[in-house]
Image (spheres, helix red, strand yellow):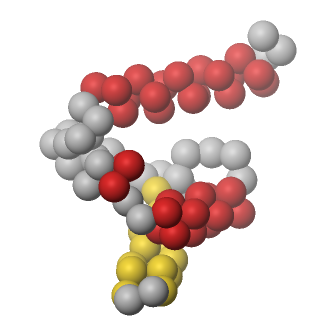
Amino acid sequence: MAVEKVPKKVVKTALKAAKAMGNGFYGVDLKESGERVVIIEVNDNPSIDMGVEDLHAGQMLYQQIMSSMLRQLDELNGR
């Protein structure tokens, strides 16, 4: 599903779970049932499968991930 089509409450819950873990790269597994969104697990080493996670964003997904990691490394190194 394209990110812009994900229900806002699902994105909000996923971001809240990831932020609780700290500043890093996390995969958040959720279940939606009616009006409820439940966190199943938070993965600190998430897989990104070609043809699955990148189905809608394509190469831009990888560029966004790498840009975020580079920005964090630059901040750590005072750049």
**Residue at (70, 46) in percent of width and height:** 23
Q: Is residue 21 visible?
A: no
**Which residue, as the protein is rendered here, is positioned at the far top?**
79
Q: In front here: 9 or 27?
A: 9
**Which residue, as the protein is rendered here, is positioned at the far left?**
51
Which quarter of the rendering shows the N terminus? bottom left
**Residue at (59, 58) in percent of width and height:** 15
Rendering quarter of residue 72: top right
The answer to whether 5 appears left or right of 43 in the picture is: left
- Depicted 59 relative to depicted 46: above or below: above
The answer to whether 73 appears left or right of 41 in the picture is: right
* Rendering coords of residue 21 (x, y %): 68, 60
* Rendering coords of residue 67 (x, y %): 53, 22
Q: In front here: 30 or 48?
A: 30
The answer to whether 39 appears left or right of 49 in the picture is: right
* Rendering coords of residue 56 (x, y %): 23, 41
Q: Is residue 77 visible?
A: yes
Which quarter of the rendering shows the C terminus? top right
**Residue at (57, 29) in percent of width and height:** 68
**Residue at (39, 80) in percent of width and height:** 32
- Depicted 61 relative to depicted 36: above or below: above
The answer to whether 8 appears left or right of 34 in the picture is: right
